[in-house]
Amino acid sequence: IFRMGNLTGRHLDGKFQNNMGESAFYSAVKEVVISGTVSDKILSEELEFSPVDSSARAILLLLRNPGSAGRIYHLMNPKTLRVETLISEFATLGISIRTQDSGKRTGKDDIPQTLSGASVYLMRGELAYGAPIRITADYTAGTLEKLGFTWPKIDRGYLGRMIQYMRQNNFLNISLDE
């Protein structure tokens, strides 16, 4: 059994599913980029990106490993990215995101009606899947490491490829600050 983390575009080129709007994560990223705002309450939150090509390689390695039979694996990239780091990296890509004091929001009337549910959580300072329970995949990560697999670091290059793909497919219609 493979339990998947937050599947995101290929690490190689940022390509993702054609129906990006069906991904709560991609919809949230889109709305935060368009609004240019994120709540200050979530700056220290960790975001998990599991590039789909890396996830596929991990699955193939585990399937080919005789010791994997009958096991449950949680495939998620342990190299997370803090929201404040994401904002900094976006700034280097020409995307300005400002933080907003979450205490200044009075309720749903402060949030544009076009935003998806996931985006509302991000802007209000709550993560849609950010429960007090911290999910780890230490056993899976250790097994994959023994098989020679390492998850990629989520950096400016990857984020740039991800945003570029979103723009090329008219999912994110923005002009970048140069």
Image (tube, rainbow, N blue to C red):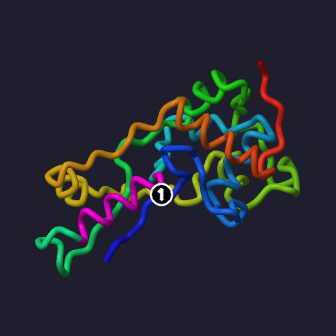
Q: How many marks?
A: 1
Query: Does the magenta portion include 53?
Result: yes
79 relative position to 73: left or right:
right
Q: Describe the element under mark 1 as helix, strand or loop.
A: helix
Query: Does the magenta portion include 136?
Result: no
Picture layout, residue 35 above or below residue 72: above
Q: Which residues are magenta?
A: 51-63
- Residue 162, given in percent of the width and then of the height, sits at 61, 43
- Residue 143, given in percent of the width and then of the height, sits at 18, 58
Name the image quarter holding the N terminus.
bottom left
Picture layout, residue 122 above or below residue 177: below
Q: Quadrant of residue 41?
A: top right
**Residue at the far bottom in the pictured view:** 70
Q: Residues within 10 Å of mark 1 (few under 14, many from 20)?
A: many
- Residue 65, given in percent of the width and then of the height, sits at 16, 68
165 relative position to 140: left or right:
right
Q: Residue at x 59, y 25 (%)?
A: 88
Q: Which residue is mark 1?
A: 52
- Residue 161, given in percent of the width and then of the height, sits at 60, 39
Mark 1: amino acid: Val
